[in-house]
């Protein structure tokens, strides 16, 4: 897999509302101790993809901070690779110009610095256990320009309304076109592989007078030429597109069977190290079916919830079906249900916060 340059594509239309107003989905907390980007970086490095570029769309500060310590947390071999950024600051405030293709176009010189045979693009809002080795092998055997990954989601079709679907050729071996047909179960995973020299050729030959495309537009054009192979993924996948998905899919991970499908001991997930003390559970703590990070002090009632680092839950406070971010302080007698509480937010005594799983309450200080 050292033949592959991995690119994390953060140019997404997914939106978690206020939760991502000042940061990208990449640096949004997941399960109290991870960021979304940790999963794709870990998947890359577990496959020995040590050269990684990140296509940044907007709100880069939290991303730079998270990755500023280098690549050691994600087991990237910095002797043979590293983690770098591709950012188009000039066009970052112009939505019609701020596309993944344009960001790549403005940073194309960096592609010359690599000698990898292939370039693999993947998002961080789709979490899965896809095998990149199998994807590469499928690509090589096909002899086509591009190979995309998709999953047949006929058993969970209602979870994928409004997303891009792949329409296959009659033999099921190549892409005809993308659509948003909600009756089509074949979901595009925003993941594809292309020969590096061919990608450079496409960028070099792009006419700057033309309308700025997206990478999906490039794939669609190749599909019309019959030059896009498809790889069918059969494992677990969750596609986080909005704040409702975020709380729903996060709480699903409290089911041990669902958790095991994502967290495989042979493919560990890495993140930044925080040397927090273990969580302290007081004599009044009553905790059931939760994921609780280090450094917390729990004295209240917490059920079916995710608690980030260094959270304080006082006696007689009740938390249910909620996500509490790091350094929040939940005071005595307060009740929180179906809610998301942001970093460092203080919920005062006897305050009641209640949303519902389809429309969670969101509170920030």
Image: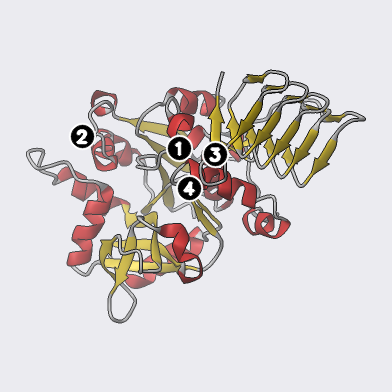
User: Which residue is disc 1 drawn over?
Assistant: 16
* Closer mark to the observer between disc 1 and disc 3: 3
Marked residue nearer the N-terminal end (3 or 2): 2
User: Which residue is disc 4 drawn over?
Assistant: 240
User: Which residue is disc 3 drawn over?
Assistant: 360
Locate residue 341, reporting x and y percent: 60, 29
Characterize the local packing of mark 2: few (<14), some (14-19) or many (20 or more) Cα atoms within 10 angstroms: some
Q: Residue furthest bottom?
A: 171
Distance of label 1 from label 3 (alpha carbons): 11 Å
Distance of label 4 from label 2 (alpha carbons): 24 Å
The reply to whether discs 3 and 2 touch (Cβ–Cβ < 8 Å) is no
Q: Taking 342 as reference, is 168 above or below it?
A: below
Q: Residue furthest left?
A: 209
- Label 2 secondary element: loop
Task: Report the residue at 25% width, 34% height from top.
Answer: 98
Left or right of 47 in this view: 324: right
Marked residue nearer the N-terminal end (2 or 1): 1
Locate residue 85, reporting x and y percent: 40, 32
Distance of label 2 from label 1 (alpha carbons): 22 Å
* Closer mark to the observer between disc 3 and disc 2: 3
The reply to whether discs 4 and 1 touch (Cβ–Cβ < 8 Å) is yes
- Label 1 secondary element: loop
Marked residue nearer the N-terminal end (1 or 3): 1
Distance of label 4 from label 1 (alpha carbons): 9 Å
Task: Report the residue at 33% width, 57% height from top.
Answer: 164
């Amino acid at each position: 897999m050292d033949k592959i340059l991995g690119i994390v594509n953060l140019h997404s239309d997914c939106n978690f509302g206020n939760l991502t107003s000042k940061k990208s989905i990449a640096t949004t907390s997941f399960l109290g101790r991870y960021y979304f980007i940790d999963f794709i970086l870990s998947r890359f490095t577990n496959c020995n993809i040590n050269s990684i570029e990140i296509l940044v769309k907007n709100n880069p500060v939290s991303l730079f901070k998270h990755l500023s310590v280098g690549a050691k947390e994600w087991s990237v071999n910095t002797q043979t690779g590293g983690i770098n950024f591709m950012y188009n600051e000039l066009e970052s405030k112009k939505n019609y110009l701020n596309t993944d293709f344009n960001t790549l176009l403005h940073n194309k010189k960096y592609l010359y610095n690599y000698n990898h045979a292939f370039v693999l693009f993947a998002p961080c809002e789709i979490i899965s256990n896809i095998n990149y080795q199998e994807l590469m092998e499928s690509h090589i055997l096909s002899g086509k320009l591009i190979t995309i990954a998709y999953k047949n989601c006929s058993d969970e079709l209602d979870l994928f309304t409004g997303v891009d679907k792949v329409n296959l050729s009659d033999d099921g071996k190549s892409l005809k076109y993308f659509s948003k047909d909600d009756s089509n179960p074949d979901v595009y995973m925003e993941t594809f592989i292309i020969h590096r020299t061919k990608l450079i050729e496409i960028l070099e030959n792009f006419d700057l007078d033309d309308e700025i495309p997206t990478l999906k537009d490039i794939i669609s054009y190749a599909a019309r030429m019959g030059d896009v192979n498809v790889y069918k993924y059969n494992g677990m996948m969750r596609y986080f597109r909005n704040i409702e998905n975020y709380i729903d899919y996060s709480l699903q991970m409290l089911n041990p069977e669902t958790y095991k499908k994502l967290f495989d001991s042979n493919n560990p997930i890495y993140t930044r190290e925080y040397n927090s003390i273990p969580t302290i559970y007081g004599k009044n703590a009553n905790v059931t079916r939760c994921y609780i990070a280090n450094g917390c002090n729990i004295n209240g009632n917490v059920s079916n919830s995710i608690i980030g680092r260094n959270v304080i839950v006082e006696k007689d406070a009740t938390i249910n079906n909620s996500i509490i971010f790091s350094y929040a302080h939940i005071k005595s007698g307060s009740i929180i249900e179906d809610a998301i509480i942001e970093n460092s937010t203080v919920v005062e005594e006897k305050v009641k916060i209640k949303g519902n799983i389809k429309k969670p309450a969101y509170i920030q200080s």
